[in-house]
C-alpha cells in the first residue's frame, strides 16, 4: 500500500458505535397493577414507552366506573438502546426485561405498530389467548389495510388476532371476514397475488 493510501486510511474517522441508535422494543415485566406507574416513570425519564389499554366497567358502591385496563397485564413496552437498560431496570415497579438465552429479547417493530394502529383507529381491543396455529391473514381494504394477524373464531364471529410473540399474548379485533385475505407464499408484501391462488378457502 502506498504512503498516500496509508495516510488516507489513518485519517478516516472510525464511527463511534455508542452513538448509533440501535433502539428496539422490549417487554418489561412489572409488579401486579404497577403498569401505569411504570409507564409514567419511563415517560418522566424520556424513555419511549407503550401501554395498550381497553375500557372496562366496574361497579363501585352505588355507581358504575369505567376503567382503563392493560391489554397485557404485567407488561409495559419500551423502545430503548443498550445504554438505557439500567434506567429501565432501576425503575420502581419493574421486575425485569424479558430475556432469551440471558439477553434482552427484542420485539418485532411490526407487532408493536400493529397494536398501535388498532388503537389509533379507535378499534375496541380485548385480550385474547396467543395462537401458534391458524390462518395468517391480511386486511385488504379499509382503515386497517395491510394489517396482518391470525384469524380465530368466537362463537359465530370471526376475529383478527394480532400477536405479541415474545410474551405469548395477543389482542383480538372483531372484523368483517370479507375484508380479509389469506397470506400465502403466493402473495407478495403488497398483498398482490403473484400467480393464481387456486381454490378460495373459506374463513
Image (spheres, helix red, strand yellow):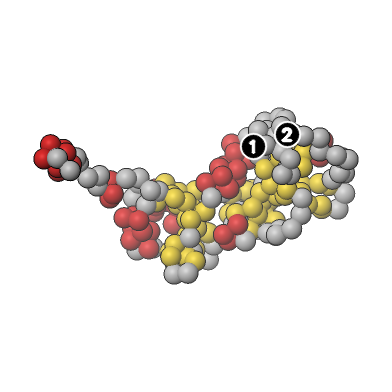
Is 68 placed above or below 132 here? Answer: above
Determine the residue positioned at 64% across, 37% down. 189
Q: Secondary structure at mark 2?
A: loop
Q: Position of residue 150 (x, y in %)?
A: 72, 49
Q: Position of residue 120 (x, y in %)?
A: 59, 36
Q: Secondary structure at mark 1?
A: loop
Nearest to N terminus: mark 1 or mark 2: 1
Label 2: few (<14), some or many (≥20) within 10 Å?
few
Determine the residue positioned at 38% across, 48% down. 22
Q: Position of residue 152 (x, y in %)?
A: 78, 52
Q: Nearer the viewer, residue 187 or 42?
A: 187
Q: Residue furthest top?
A: 142
Which residue is identified by label 2?
194
Q: Which mark is residue 167?
A: none
Question: Would residue 7 be visible to someone looking at this image?
Answer: no
Label 1: few (<14), some or many (≥20) within 10 Å?
few
Q: Nearer the viewer, mark 1 or mark 2?
A: 2
Question: Would residue 157 be visible to someone looking at this image?
Answer: yes
Q: Nearer the viewer, residue 7 or 189?
A: 7
* Residue 9 horizontal side relative to residue 122, left or right: left
Which residue is identified by label 1?
189
Q: Residue furthest bottom?
A: 102
Amino acid at each position: 500500500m502506498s504512503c498516500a493510501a496509508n495516510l488516507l486510511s489513518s485519517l478516516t474517522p472510525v464511527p463511534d458505535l455508542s452513538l448509533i441508535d440501535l433502539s428496539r422494543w422490549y417487554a418489561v415485566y412489572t409488579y401486579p397493577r404497577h403498569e401505569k406507574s411504570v409507564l409514567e416513570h419511563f415517560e418522566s425519564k424520556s424513555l419511549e414507552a407503550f401501554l395498550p389499554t381497553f375500557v372496562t366497567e366496574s361497579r363501585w358502591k352505588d355507581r358504575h366506573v369505567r376503567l382503563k385496563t392493560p391489554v397485557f397485564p404485567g407488561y409495559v413496552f419500551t423502545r430503548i438502546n443498550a445504554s438505557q437498560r439500567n434506567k429501565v431496570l432501576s425503575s420502581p415497579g419493574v421486575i425485569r426485561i424479558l430475556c432469551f438465552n440471558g439477553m434482552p429479547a427484542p420485539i418485532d417493530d411490526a407487532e408493536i405498530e400493529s397494536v398501535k394502529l388498532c388503537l389509533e383507529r379507535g378499534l375496541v381491543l380485548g385480550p385474547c389467548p396467543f395462537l401458534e396455529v391458524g390462518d395468517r391473514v391480511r386486511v385488504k381494504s379499509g382503515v386497517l389495510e395491510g394489517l396482518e394477524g391470525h384469524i380465530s373464531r368466537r362463537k359465530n364471529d370471526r376475529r383478527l388476532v394480532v400477536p405479541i410473540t415474545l410474551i405469548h399474548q395477543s389482542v383480538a379485533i372483531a372484523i368483517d371476514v370479507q375484508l380479509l385475505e389469506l397470506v400465502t407464499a403466493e402473495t407478495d408484501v403488497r398483498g398482490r397475488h403473484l400467480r393464481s391462488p387456486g381454490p378460495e378457502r373459506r374463513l
